[in-house]
Image: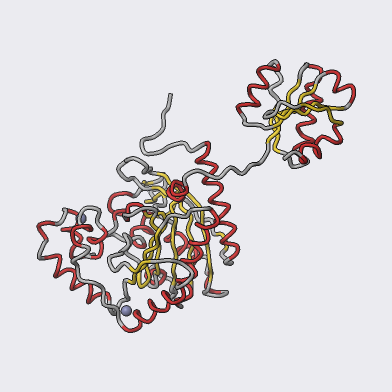
Amino acid sequence: MAKLVRGFRDIFGPEAAALTALESSARKVFKLYGVSELRIPTVEQKELFVKATGTTTDIVQKEMYSFEDAGHRLLALRPEGTPGVARAYIENNFAQGSPVQQFFYIGNMFRAERPQAGRYREFEQIGAEFLGNPAPAADAQAILLLKDIMKDFGVKHYSVKINSLGCEKCRPLYRQALIEYLSSSKDDLCDLCKDRLERNPLRVLDCKIDGPKFKESAPKMALCPECEEHFSQVKKLLDGKIEYIVDPCLVRGLDYYTRTVFEFQAGESSQNAIAAGGRYDTLIKSMGGADIPAVGWAMGAERTCAALGSLPDCGEKKVYVVSLEKDCNEYAFNIMQTLRDAGIITEGGLFDKNIKGQMKQADRTKASLAVIVGGTEKERGTAELKDLTSGEQKEYLISELAAAIKNIK
Ligand SMILES: [Zn+2]
Ligand SMILES: [Zn+2]
């Protein structure tokens, strides 16, 4: 018998229900912000992620599911959504109508991480991208959109960190200062960071091993006047609308971020990030598109569900339909459809079992009401409605059954 592949899993029960609820919350809030859906493919050319996500990232260096197809194309299962959205934006000439576009995506991503508790190689991300708007209002909207999804879904305990990574003008100076600072402790760095030091020193601060050692004492970003102004505008727009902490040590694991970066954390450490994002003003251009600024984020759907704990009981009542005799099966079956037509959640149809077996199943499905029919009821055009909590039972005409069920609290 074939088994699950290591690092993958089945999702069912309350967890599947929580993911669905999160997706509906997200869709509701996306609509409110005028963000429309973009369904990007799961498979892209490997080159897209190498170029966009960046060669110095863990994703590209260690975690990408890449393969060659029968036509000798080098492909990859998407490890994140932003490169696909950027590619689609360029390829479909979205900028032609108006460069300003707002997209969201909901889909599974793949990363060949070392399997560990709570980490899987296939996971769901919900993401939003605001393209074409360089103004701080885009950054602030992206962050507030994320907050509103958390609120609608019901996640209460999280913190928000923001920072600015500067631009092509001011970041190189910081980069140089960081290289100088870290070079003096080069021997203390992990092998990967020794290698990263010259190419992308910011990533050292993001390293799970070295980050905590150097974050506090490392030199801090000194923004140029334009970046300073941009960042202060973002903060001003957020003030009073969301609680946030400015964390000068917040860097993100991706190469393409410029200016604003942010992270929503469910716990104390960055390992508990439930959503993260930032501005990426140079990505579209670096991919061969026009000079289009952008800001976006991605949320880990499973992690966000975990941060919620358990879903509140929606309190919807469910009816289970039981047939007492073979002659009544069709009659019972038709009642099931009639109730569903009336918008009542209905299960049943286990007519090969006796009443005990059917009532047991009613209990398993957590139905609060049972509709029971036998020869007498069929003859009279009625059904017995039984409250499974109180045990009370009453006979109703089929034409009055749905209304009677809806009247029960
Ligand atoms: Zn700058
Ligand atoms: Zn390291």
- Left or right: 406 in relation to 11: right
Give the residue displayed 45% in from the left and 63% down from the top. 87
Examine the rendered structure and indicate whether residue 401 appears above or below residue 220: above
- Which corner quadrant of the image does residue 55 belong to? bottom left
Foreground residue among 84 and 245: 245
Q: Is residue 90 visible?
A: no
Give the residue displayed 33% in from the left and 54% down from the top. 268
Q: Ligand 1 is in which quadrant of the figure? A: bottom left
- Left or right: 30 in relation to 290: right
Position of residue 198 measured from the top left corner of the image (x, y, whole percent): 18, 65
Position of residue 297 measured from the top left corner of the image (x, y, whole percent): 44, 62
Foreground residue among 45 and 73: 45
Quarter holding the N terminus is: top left
Most extreme residue toward the right, as rendered? Answer: 380
What number of labels is visible?
0
Examine the rendered structure and indicate whether residue 56 appears above or below residue 65: below
Position of residue 286 measured from the top left corner of the image (x, y, whole percent): 37, 70
